[in-house]
Image (cartoon, rainbow, N blue to C red):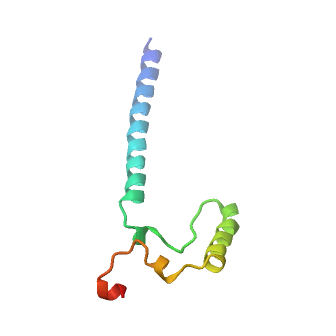
Amino acid sequence: MVAKTAYLSLCLFGTYHLTKMSFALLTTALMGRFGKPQLVRETSKIWTNNYAAIPFIWGKKFVKRNVMKQTEGGLLKGVILDKQLED
């Protein structure tokens, strides 16, 4: 009976801390995604933990940069500027 009580207490303790850490990580991820402006969030740096995906990311950047050229109006899409600066 003591062993079962200790096991149940350990399971409850682990569940409590796992849930607490999961919510903290979820909150951090959501604030990182939605809490930053678009200009701060976007970067040209390639960052991934999956090293096999790096050639695909380079290829995507190459196609985006060279094949699908952006127009001048598209570069300032979503950027709020003073009217004089925008002109």
Residue at image position (44%, 11%) is 1
Q: Quadrant of the C terminus?
A: bottom left
Callout count: 0
Q: Residue furthest top?
A: 1
Residue nearest the observer in this picture, 41 or 26: 41
Query: In the rendered view, does 8 fall on the left or right side of 70?
Result: left
Q: Position of residue 46 (x, y in %)?
A: 58, 70
Residue 6 occupies which quadrant of the picture? top left
Residue nearest the observer in this picture, 28 or 21: 28
Query: In the rendered view, does 35 fall on the left or right side of 63?
Result: left
Residue at image position (30%, 88%) is 84
Residue at image position (59%, 63%) is 48
Q: Position of residue 31 (x, y in %)?
A: 37, 56
Q: Position of residue 69 (x, y in %)?
A: 60, 79
Residue nearest the observer in this picture, 75 or 32: 75
Residue at image position (54%, 73%) is 45
Q: Is residue 83 above or below residue 60?
A: below
Query: In the rendered view, does 15 fall on the left or right side of 71?
Result: left
Q: Position of residue 4 (x, y in %)?
A: 46, 16
